[in-house]
Image: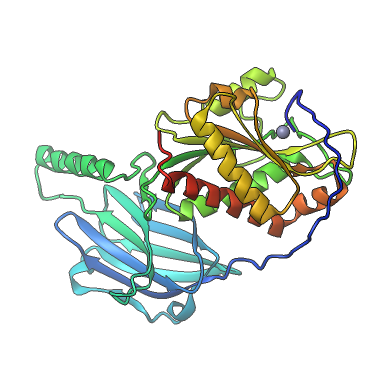
C-alpha cells in the first residue's frame, strides 16, 4: 500500500488459480581445480538439470576456506567423493575440496586453500554444447606472490584489480562476482515497509511487509543467478532508517542504499482498500520519466503474464522513491492484500516465486533492449 494513496476500481474478476512446480534442482557433475595462469587458480564446479542459486559465497582469509552455499542443488555423483579432481599443477595451492548435502536441495562446497589469497572471484557460466561443457560455477582464486618484494607484489595485485574492474567484476566485498552474460548491471530492490511499519494487513493477518520481502528475496536470488549485482534496501524485517521516523526519512534511507552506479530501482508493495472487492495489479513510474515508464511497462506486462491478476495499468505518480532516485525507478503493487483471494495468493510461496520470475523477466527485457542510462 502506498502511503496516502488509495484508489478504488471495482470490477468483476475471474481468477485463474494455477500452481507452479518448484524450480528443478541442479545436480553437480564434476569439480575440477587447475592452474589457469600466472595469477589465478581456477575451480570449475559443473552442474546439470536445473537452476542453481548461489545463496551465499564467502571467503575466510584466515582459514583459507572458500565456502559456497548452493541452494536448489543436489551433490549428485559428487556425494560419493568421486568426481572431484585437483590437477597436479593445483595441488600446491588447493589442499582439498569437500562437498556436503546440508539440507534438502542444499549443497555446501568448501575449498581449502594451502596458502592465503588476495581475492576470490565467482562467476556463472552457461552450458556450452559445442565444447560439451555443462553449466559451471567458476571460482577464480587470485594467487599471492609471496616470493616477490612488497612493492612489486602490491603493484601487480592492484593492476589485476583494475583489470577485473574493467571486466565488470564487483570488487567491493572481499569476494567477487561477475555477471553470467548480464554484464553485472546494478539493480536495487526495495521491499516496501518493514519493522515497525507492517504496511497493509489482509483479512487473515498477512502483512504487506512480509509479502514484499518474500517476493523481493526470491527476485534477488533469480536476478543474482542471472548475473546482476543486486542491492537490497532490506533483507530482514526492519525499518531501514529507524522505527518511528517521518516517512520522508525512512524513504530517503531506502533511496540512499543505491550506489552511484545503480541502473534501476524497483520498489515492491501490495495494494489495499477499504472495499474488499478491490483487486488487481498495477505499476508506477515518475510522471515524466521515459526510462522509468519503460521499466514500469515491462514489469506490468510480465506481472500480468505470470501473475495473472486483473491489470490496473501503468501509471505516473509522484511517489518519493521514484522521484528521489537518480536512476529509472518503478513502484509495483503486486495485488490487493485486502482482497481475500489475492491475500491468499500473495501469501503463497509458489505465487511469490512467479512474481519474482516476472520481475526477473522484466529486468532482462529492460537491459536486452538497451535500457542502461
Ligand atoms: Zn506499500
Residue pictured at 53% horizontal, 27% vertical: 289
Residue 359 in picture, x, y percent from top left:
58, 48
Please indicate, yes or no, whether residue 189 appears anywhere in the rendered image: no
The foreground one among 1 and 295 is 295
The foreground one among 215 and 181 is 181
Residue pictured at 67% horizontal, 50% vertical: 304
Residue 30 in picture, x, y percent from top left:
37, 75
The foreground one among 264 and 167 is 264
Q: Quadrant of residue 174?
A: top left
Position of residue 48 relative to residue 351, above or below, is below
Residue pictured at 73% horizontal, 65% vertical: 19
- Indicate left or right for 366 with 89 as reference: right
For the N terminus, the image quarter is: top right
Q: Quadrant of residue 370?
A: top left
For the C terminus, the image quarter is: top left
Position of residue 93 relative to residue 177, above or below, is below
- Indicate left or right for 115 with 301 as reference: left
Residue pictured at 28% horizontal, 74% vertical: 131
- Indicate left or right for 300 with 84 as reference: right
Q: Quarter containing ligand 1?
A: top right
Residue 40 in picture, x, y percent from top left:
21, 57
The foreground one among 145 and 76 is 76
Residue 218 in picture, x, y percent from top left:
60, 52
Amino acid at each position: 500500500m502506498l502511503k496516502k494513496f488509495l484508489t478504488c476500481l471495482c470490477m468483476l474478476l475471474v481468477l485463474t488459480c494455477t500452481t507452479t512446480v518448484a524450480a528443478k534442482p541442479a545436480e553437480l557433475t564434476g569439480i575440477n581445480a587447475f592452474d589457469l595462469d600466472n595469477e589465478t587458480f581456477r575451480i570449475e564446479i559443473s552442474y546439470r538439470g536445473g537452476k542453481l542459486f548461489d545463496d551465499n559465497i564467502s571467503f575466510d582469509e584466515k582459514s583459507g576456506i572458500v565456502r559456497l552455499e548452493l541452494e536448489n542443488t543436489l551433490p549428485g555423483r559428487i556425494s560419493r567423493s568421486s568426481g572431484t579432481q585437483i590437477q597436479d599443477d593445483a595441488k600446491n595451492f588447493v589442499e582439498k575440496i569437500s562437498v556436503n548435502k546440508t539440507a534438502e536441495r542444499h549443497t555446501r562446497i568448501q575449498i581449502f586453500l594451502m596458502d592465503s589469497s588476495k581475492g576470490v572471484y565467482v562467476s556463472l557460466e552457461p552450458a556450452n554444447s559445442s565444447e560439451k561443457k555443462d553449466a559451471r560455477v567458476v571460482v577464480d582464486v587470485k594467487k599471492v606472490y609471496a616470493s616477490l618484494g612488497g612493492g612489486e607484489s602490491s603493484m601487480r595485485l592492484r593492476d589485476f584489480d583494475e583489470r577485473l574492474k574493467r571486466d565488470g567484476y564487483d570488487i567491493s566485498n572481499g569476494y567477487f562476482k561477475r555477471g553470467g552474460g548480464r554484464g553485472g548491471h546494478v539493480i536495487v530492490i526495495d521491499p516496501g515497509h518493514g519493522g515497525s511499519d507492517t504496511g497493509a494487513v489482509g483479512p487473515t493477518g498477512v502483512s504487506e511487509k512480509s509479502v514484499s520481502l518474500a517476493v523481493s528475496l526470491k527476485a534477488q536470488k533469480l536476478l543474482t543467478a542471472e548475473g546482476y549485482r543486486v542491492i537490497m534496501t532490506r533483507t530482514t524485517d526492519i525499518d531501514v532508517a529507524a522505527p518511528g521516523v517521518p516517512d520522508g526519512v525512512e524513504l530517503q534511507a531506502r533511496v540512499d542504499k543505491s550506489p552511484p552506479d545503480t541502473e534501476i530501482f524497483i520498489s515492491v508493495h501490495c495494494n489495499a482498500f477499504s472495499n474488499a472487492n478491490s483487486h488487481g495489479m498495477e505499476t508506477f513510474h515518475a510522471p515524466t520519466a521515459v526510462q522509468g515508464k519503460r521499466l514500469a511497462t515491462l514489469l506490468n506486462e510480465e506481472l500480468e503474464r505470470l501473475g495473472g491478476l486483473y491489470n490496473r495499468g501503468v501509471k505516473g505518480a509522484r511517489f518519493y522513491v521514484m522521484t528521489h532516485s537518480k536512476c529509472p525507478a518503478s513502484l509495483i503493487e503486486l495485488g490487493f492484500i485486502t482482497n481475500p483471494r489475492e491475500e491468499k495468493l500473495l501469501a503463497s510461496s509458489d505465487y511469490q516465486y512467479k512474481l519474482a520470475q516476472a520481475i526477473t523477466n522484466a529486468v532482462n527485457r529492460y537491459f536486452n533492449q538497451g535500457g542502461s542510462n
